[in-house]
Image (spheres, rainbow, N blue to C red):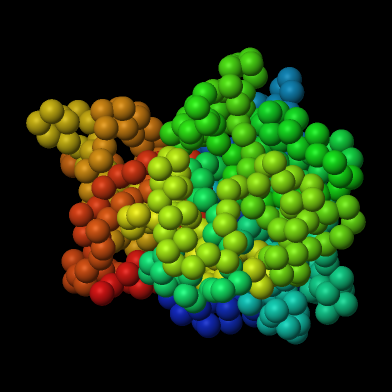
Amino acid sequence: MRLARIVATSAAVAATRSRKQKTTELGALLRDCAPDEIPTVVAWLTGVTRQGRIGVGWRSLMALDAAPAGEPTLTVTGVDDLLTRLAAATGPGSVAERKQLLLELFGGADESEQHFLRRLLTGELRQGALAGVMADAIADAAGQPIDLVRRAHMLTGSLPQTAALAVFGGAEALGAVGLEVGRAVAPMLATPADSLADAVTSLGPELVIDYKLDGARIQVHRRHDDVAVYTRSLRDITAAVPDVVAVVRELDCETVILDGETLTLDADGRPRPFQDTMSRFGSAAEHGDDPAGLLRPFFFDCLHLDGVDLIDRPLAERLAALDTVAAALRIPSVRSPDVDAAQRFFDDALAAGHEGVMAKSLDGVYAAGRRGKAWQKIKPTHTVDLVVLGAEWGSGRRTGLLSNLHLGARDPDGGSPIMVGKTFKGLTDALLAWQTDEFPKHSSGRDGHTVYLRPEIVVEIELDGVQRSSRYPGGVALRFARVVRYRPDKTAAEADTIDAIRAMLP
């Protein structure tokens, strides 16, 4: 298949907000692909290359002097082979080799193909083919049940691999996918509760309430002495967290998959600021035996233990397994409380320096990668994770500093983030200095007052609520928004959606 067909489909998908139309366009493309092309095309149209990161940045591409070809001739297989060579180019002489490969690639591409490739290689390709839409398209193209495709994607963590299974193996191959120790699965997510009382009433009486720690989400896999640690975005950070690995190696088991959080603690056991936890990733060795420099793991779920997969078992069974292997590392919790007991537990969590609590149904299974009512989070204030779209230059004492933030909510259908407000409140001198230095590295353009950013940076915003507004395209605006912290542990694909913001309307 010609690359030009992929480029045309990408443009068509970007041009519509209809999920059905996106699925139709993608499904038609996949049906026309040769079977061995499908994993590559699926990867590209979800914004990544099959080879992963290949070390090509904006500066390299902007400095590239390659005139567009007169007509499109590139093929999917040819481009994929060239990207494989590019990813393999390392060591002495690699700079010149990589430049020559890029010239070969871009010299063979017409103008629209160059634009597509430039965005693909720099992580800027966002035409709306998010995981959910692509999963629908795979099911449509392969003629397989969508539930089977979604489950296979959940357990493999890879849409290209899921597409290959659907096309080459059909329902039997999709259904055979199970948990695999050492292969990360998408984490289960929580829905904000209207109130603690509502959560207890809707989930009770068979529920458990956990502290909601102010840490970084981790998923830990262990097979004998081999331990792997993943972030919420499934990034492997094993080498960066030796203190967590050491703790997990001490557990009395052969194989296990645990879900939890990691954070740093003060000498008195209180959590240190979230920024301290994030700064310790990969730096624990620098702190030696200093307890403040250690990342401490705490777990709230067990998906596998000693050969038994638990992901489809009720939470009550998963917690029983967790208690047999890591009871000392379990997040503080209370089982089957009434509203008054839950409120006391919530107050204790806040007094101990934590964010709030999580209420969970003991009957619920682990719905990886999805938000559902089986897990509900309760905090003392409304907070949302939004994407920074730009920042305005400050005035007065903030002259020369990037200050007022433009904030966007994620489009659940995969389009560009949708602006919902601005704020300069909550920005400390340290944050102002940081974002003035950092934001230009993510710039997509600027005018006399504003630096506009590629949607890559996520910020946690506290607000008093939302209101209807004709000023912003989503029809809703934040009320009294203020910055809590930046979230380097989250990508723009994990920000809160415009639907979640609209659901907060009175």
Q: In this orientation, which residue lies closer to the viewer: 506 or 82?
A: 506
Judged from this view, the residue extending furthest toward the left is: 396
The N terminus, quarter of image: bottom right
Q: Is residue 464 above or below residue 256?
A: below
Which residue corresponds to the image point at 64% horizontal and 52% vertical from the top-left?
300
Residue 426 quadrant? top left
Which residue corresponds to the image point at 65% horizontal and 26% vertical from the top-left?
95
The C terminus, quarter of image: bottom left
Which residue corresponds to the image point at 23% horizontal and 48% vertical from the top-left?
423
- Left or right relative to 124: residue 253: right
Which residue corresponds to the image point at 38% horizontal and 48% vertical from the top-left?
460
Residue 50 percent coordinates (x, y): 71, 52
Residue 346 percent coordinates (x, y): 44, 54
Residue 435 percent coordinates (x, y): 33, 34
Q: In this orientation, which residue lies closer to the viewer: 347 or 93?
A: 347
- Left or right relative to 257: residue 44: left
Residue 414 visible here: no
Q: In this orientation, which residue lies closer to the viewer: 148 or 12?
A: 148
Residue 409 percent coordinates (x, y): 37, 60
Q: In this orientation, which residue lies closer to the viewer: 477 or 66?
A: 477
Residue 224 quadrant? top right
Residue 270 visible here: yes
